[in-house]
Amino acid sequence: SSRFGSSFGSSDLSRRSWHCTRLPQLRSPYKHDDVQGHSHRHRLRAAFAVAVGVGLGCRDMWRWWLPVAELSRPCAAAVEFSCEDKAGPEPLREPPRLADEWRHCRRRGQCCEGATSPPPGWSLKRSCPGGLDIKVMTYNLFWWNLFGQQFQNGNGGSAGKLIQASGVDAPLDFMVFQECEDGNRVLRDAGLEATHAALGIQHAIALAYRKDAWRLEGSDVLVDVAEDQPGLWGRRSLLLARFKHVASGKTVLLANHHGPLVVGSGGICGGKATAWNILRAIAEHAQADDAIVLMGDFNAEASSETVQTLDRYINRHYTGVSFRGVDHIFSSCEAMHIKEVKNLGNGGSDHDALAEVLTI
């Protein structure tokens, strides 16, 4: 376990004795039924939750029915009752890796309880040694519209041209894309297919790196860290990869995130849980000397609970303006290491691309 991961703290996954109470009424925790079939799905989920709750006990109910304000309650669901578990505590054990824990949470309906805060004093913030400048970019590509045949159909390669122009003064070392179905197409449009390699397209997030300067250490990893509120697009992930600089030997952990909807909500488990899951995934995959760069469309503004929580543990270097500022660049390196930040425009997307040069 790395120095980051070993001190993160254990998840308290032990069982507790819960008290039975009766909740006043069945209700949706969401204010607007703005997705077709949303109310009908709520009724179906409520019926299913009742059946599961009666058959398996409260701890197995699906927690995605909980309003964010009620996530701290140990056992409640938006049905007309809550239950208790008198089986007593189980011995504490070492927490599983986050991906395994997420599957555990999905089975038992406790993904929100599976998110644990870092212990006091834990942080990814630090002063980096310097000596190597790297250039990074984050870009939500609005794929279905910008590249959809029935819509803009690539818009003459406008996104690629934006990327190409941004690398004229200094080459891009790392790029992360959200709403991206084909990272290689983006590189082709940018004229970078020969110099850069693309990784990952699951959950429509990808990254690219400069092949002559960096070597991929191991393989890229996709970790589920959040989930949209019901009726939307489902689980949200963090794409991670470690790289070693060929000339200097310096290492970077690159992380790409496309955050949960509704914007600013943090998804079904709220902003703190989403941020904690992101931090834990980074801690589990980082090595002690890595410069950490976390970028993406977080679907969370600077004032959101997600970003405010992340700000406590990792340095935020730059925030865009699209959708009131949901695109961010974070790094373990302190602000003194920022050499340049720039909004590159949208290139036909509904988000602006953001770029930064920092010294690691």
Image (tube, rainbow, N blue to C red):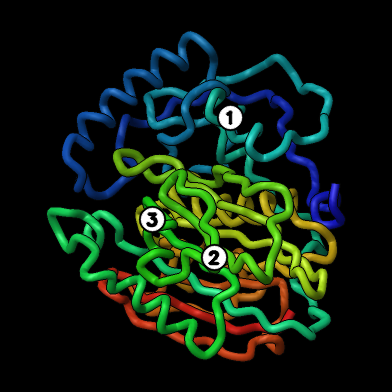
Residue position for label 3: 180
Q: Are marks 3 and 2 in contact (CB under 8 Å)?
A: no
Residue position for label 2: 196
Neighbor class of circle 1 (other Cα within 10 Å; few <14, some 14-19, many 20+) is some
Q: Position of residue 224 (x, y in %)?
A: 55, 43
Distance, label 1 to label 3, CA atoms, is 25 Å
Quadrant in the rendering for residue 51: top left
Q: Position of residue 109 (x, y in %)?
A: 52, 28
Residue type at mark 2 is: His
Mark 1 or mark 2: whose residue is earlier in sequence: 1
Residue 150 visible here: yes
Exactly how many numbered labels are in the figure?
Answer: 3
Q: Position of residue 168 (x, y in %)?
A: 48, 87
Q: Are marks 1 and 3 in contact (CB under 8 Å)?
A: no
Depth check: 104 or 84 in front?
104
* Left or right: residue 332 compared with residue 4: left
